[in-house]
Image (cartoon, rainbow, N blue to C red):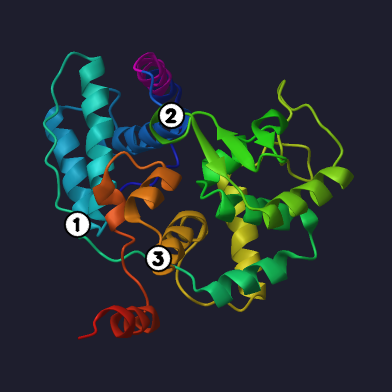
Amino acid sequence: MKKLWDVCNEDFESVLNRYERHLRNQRFSSNTVERYKKDISRLLVFSSDRHPTLEQADAFRDSLIEDGVAASSVNTVGCALKQFYGMYGEQFKIKTLRVRNIIPYFFSEDEVGRIFDAANHNIKHLAMLQTMFYGCLRASELCDLEDKDIDIDRLVIRVHHGKGDKDGIVMINPQCAQTLRRYLSVRPSKIINGKQYLFYTDYNRKWDRTSLFEVFRDIKRRAKVFSPGGLHVFGRHTPATLMIAHGADIRVVQTILRHNDIKTTLRYAHVSDTTKRTMYDKYLTV
């Protein structure tokens, strides 16, 4: 695939700006808009054309498959292409690839504890990770939190414009609340772009997912946690897996994770061999 060195070409920028307006008019979330724009910028570079043909779009998609891009990512590109050509009144037919129903990675309770311990020297980082873990938050949701979204006394957080542009209420536990109180007691209040974000960087900027990933990668390394997985595994896969392993009802977990479809939650209905043996010995008796 061609490199992205010329993606800032003014002709391409005008197309991408129009595409962004189109997506926002369709009420796509900001994260989806950015993801789709990135995919279309790659298409424009691939084709060296401001308005690639449908045949060029198919060739671009095929090149992703040849490069070994994950099926779920290829399917997301297909959705971006459908919206792009729909903007011109054309129809791009999505050829959905079958996504393997693989067991998600997750961290053990010991690994989560070591990650918290490794972050303990920095109250901001500890507060961020505990809020993400106990609130079962996505990285973008953590970055978007404002002071007004936190109700420490009631142990709840309001999430605005989550996945699918949905709002929701998530819970935290007393341990997380205590950490947040410590953090807020020493954190100066800052207004950034008219908003008072709960967490901001040392450069007085709003956190973005890339910077957050880098912080987590460093903390994970210092915790000597070598299991695969990044922030999404830490904030979503792991708490879901641990709740189910401890006996939580799958539909309760579905509500906590704010999943529309129970099938999404069922991906986490896997448990460790130790848990399976304990449950087996407890419940399979004659």
Q: Residue at 22% x, 37% y: name it.
A: 78
Left or right, 89 with respect to 159, comes to left
Q: CA distance from mark 3 to mark 1?
A: 42 Å
Is label 3 in contact with label 2 (beta carbons under 8 Å)?
A: no
* Location of residue 205 in the rendering, given as x and y in whole percent from the top left corner: 72, 36
User: Is residue 216 at least partly visible in the picture?
Assistant: yes
Instruction: Determine which residue is flagged by label 3.
Output: 247
* Residue 14: image location, x then y, percent: 42, 18
Label 2 neighbourhood size at 10 Å, few (<14), some (14-19), many (20+)?
few
Left or right: 55 as drawn, with respect to 68: left
Q: Give the magenta-colored segment's residue range.
A: 16-26
Prevalent SS, magenta region: helix
From the image, state whether disc 3 or disc 1 is nearer to you: 3
Amino acid type indicated by mark 1: Glu
Q: Of helix, strand and loop, which one carries label 1?
A: helix
Sequence-wise, the earlier of marks 3 and 2 is 2
- Label 2 vs 1, first from the N-terminus: 1
Q: Residues within 10 Å of mark 1 (few under 14, many from 20)?
A: few
Dot 2 amino acid type: Lys
Disc 2 element: loop
Task: Tell me the residue at 21%/50% (across/down).
Answer: 63
Q: Which residue is mark 1?
A: 66
Q: Is residue 22 magenta?
A: yes
Cα separation, mark 3 vs mark 2, equals 28 Å
Using the image as rendered, state which of residue 38 and residue 116 is in the foreground.
116
